[in-house]
Amino acid sequence: MATAKRAQMQQRQPVRWGRNLTILALLVAAVLTAWFWTRMRVTAEARASYAAQTGCLCRYTAARALASCQGDASVKQSWVGLHEDASAHSLTASVPLLATQTARWSPEGGCVLDPWTE
């Protein structure tokens, strides 16, 4: 009887360890994602703001085509996309799922970024 119970406990042990290791791995992954997510979001906000400002200056102050501005090294950054609203004289730079920033051009003030929202 004792050997049967011992055999049953030995069979359960690997399952318990596997489950605990899986839970631990998921917890570590969630913590790392949360920590890096904040850093990635802040970096994305800064890159989107820089690209929107520089793209607006290129497009409306220098009067270049949007395709030409997107090819500039200062605007062309990883994952940053530019979108123009010609009627509002604004250029929006975005990093998918992380950040969006708009710069608006006016004759009096030039290119001005919209205020950041939290």
Image (cartoon, helix red, strand yellow):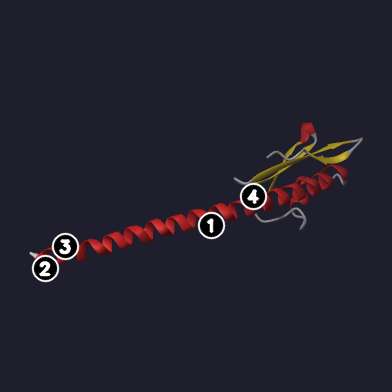
Residue carrying label 1: 32
Horizontal side of 19 relative to 12 (left or right) equals: right
Q: Is residue 85 above or below residue 59?
A: above
Q: Which mark is residue 41?
A: 4
Residue at left offset 80%, top offset 35%: 89
Nearer the observer, disc 2 or disc 4?
2
Q: In the image, which is nearer the foreground, mark 3 or mark 2?
A: 2
Label 3, label 1: how far apart the Cα atoms are:
37 Å
N-terminal of the pair, mark 3 or mark 2, is 2
For the residue marked with disc 1, what is the amino acid? Leu
Mark 4 / mark 1, whichever is N-terminal: 1
> Which residue is the site of mark 3?
8
Can you give x and y, in whole percent of width and height, for residue 25 in the image? 43, 59
Secondary structure state at the residue bearing disc 3 = helix
Seen in the image, is 27 located left or right of residue 20? Answer: right
Q: Secondary structure at mark 1?
A: helix
Q: Cα distance, mark 4 to mark 1?
A: 14 Å
Image side of residue 56 versus residue 15, left or right: right
Q: Secondary structure under badge 4?
A: helix
Q: Which residue is mark 2?
A: 3
Residue 107 is marked as none
Mark 4 or mark 1, whichever is nearer to me: 1
Q: Residues under labels 4 and 3: Cα distance?
A: 50 Å
Asked whether 41 or 84 is in front, the reply is 41
**Residue farthest top in this picture:** 87
Distance, label 1 to label 2, CA atoms, is: 44 Å
Left or right for 104, reference 31: right
**Dot 4 amino acid type:** Arg
